[in-house]
Amino acid sequence: MRHMKFEQSPFLHVISVDDEYIALYNSLNLEVAFLKKDFIKQYQQEQVFISSDATSERILEQLEGLGLLIKERADGYELYREYQKALDEPAINILYLLLSDACNIRCRYCYFLAPMPHGYQSSLMKKETAIKALDLFTHCVKRSITKGHPEQHIVIYGGEPTLNKEVLLEVLQYIDRLKAKKLLPGKLPITVNTNGILLDKEILTQCKATEVVVAISVDGPKEIHDQMRVYSSGKGTFDEVMRSYRLAQQMGVKTGICVTIDRHNLFRMKEIVRWLADELGAKGMGFNILIENEVDPIVSGEKTQYGEIVAQKLIESFKMARAAGIYEDRMMRRVKNFLDKTPVLSDCGGCGLQIVVSPDGKIGVCQAFCGRKEFFVTEPLETFEPESHPFWKQWRKRSPLANKVCRSCVALGNCGGGCPYNAYRTKGTIYALDERFCVHAKATTHFLIRDLWEKQKERQTANK
Ligand code: SF4
Ligand code: SF4
């Protein structure tokens, strides 16, 4: 009997899933196999797995097929290098169009207005600028499709975009014309991110006609929402937001709900999910993890603690949303990557995948830098090619797949690296870790593996 020898992949993690079983998990190709705990004792001698009979040979070969084990002295980094190559080239798939950098309310945790320099003059985007920005995006999309990127997205954003109603309506009609002329893909999703207060029948009619998703920020029932989402007077905005949300629902407009997680709702997330399902009939929602705000640092300044609590609460809330038939975007993206076995190179569009156009026509990488215009350029919208600009190239490299520290991390392939702006704010460089997010990403990875195991066990029991 010959003894076949295998080594473990450099990306292998062994995770206990219950008293009897372990998961062998490859953090890069996201393959997983569940085996009895004595497997390791039986076949592993130091770093090498050795077959002892035909059955063990078959099992070890299957594990090699999944990339969990590699042939003795094989390299094991081929796929890693391939993904790293993809980070050489930015490909612009997302447009953030900032129709206004002013806002009609003053959310206490706002990451956008808080860092604005003293005396900053906000403005509304002119129609001509918006048209040029959309034309620029059509060129980017064409190049990106040629490079094999099939999915694009336009986000109409602010400040508060509905403050610029006239241009908002023009923009939606113009996007429709670009789609009709096949200059943009017909199915390209468009989202208007709004606090909801100024939505009216005219805007909503246009949103419905152009199949736009209106994403409204609601942090929970009135007494929760009104703690943070307030006018400058301090009065809560809940009643006006609900009026608009109900109107959008009555008119059959596609809506989504954004819930920003901070101290006011962190410990009530399960209750909020139930409320969204029962009271608002919500079908889709997304939890926003708080972005650093220099005026009012996160939850008593306890950043790691915030990360741990958010991670745990997000998982609990996701399970509840799943049971209630609500699509929770943040976790579902991770579930999708995990099940499709497609590693996510970056979680943030700013990492070489998006352009942000500010109301004054400057082109940037990330909307959070709009106030200071860091990582923004003043270039003609007609001719600019972001893919070859150093900012977009630098940000494209901001990925766990390009960070040595991340190589041995269990979350490597389904993390995406969180928010570079948070890293920059806290550590002075976009390449640093967004540590709060790391806690969340690792907890999510463990949850996905254990959840898969639970589902597998349920199926096995049902088939008996
Ligand atoms: S760095 Fe990325 S995730 Fe963070 S605020 Fe900017 S676009 Fe959003
Ligand atoms: S969780 Fe943190 S350390 Fe791990 S891969 Fe993601 S960014 Fe890197």
Image (spheres, rainbow, N blue to C red):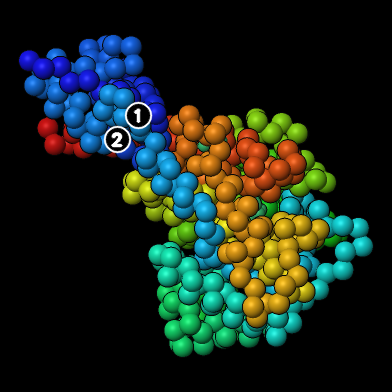
- Return the residue at label 1: 9
Q: Position of residue 349 (x, y in %)?
A: 57, 57
Quarter where residue 7 is shown: top left
Q: Amino acid at mark 1?
A: Ser
For the residue pair 362 and 16, the one nearer the viewer reads as 362
Mark 1: few, some, or many residues within 10 Å (few <14, many ≥20)?
Answer: many
* Side of 60 where 417 appears, left or right: right
- Return the residue at label 2: 67
* Side of 395 where 70 appears, left or right: left
For the residue pair 184 and 385, the one nearer the viewer reads as 385
The residue at 42%/41% (across/down) is 80
Q: Are marks 1 and 2 in contact (CB under 8 Å)?
A: yes
Circle 2 SS class: loop
Q: Amino acid at mark 2?
A: Gly
Q: Position of residue 292 (x, y in %)?
A: 72, 45
Q: For the N terminus, which image quadrant?
A: top left
Q: Is residue 394 visible?
A: yes
User: Is 111 placed above or below 43 here?
Assistant: below
Q: For the C terminus, which image quadrant?
A: top left
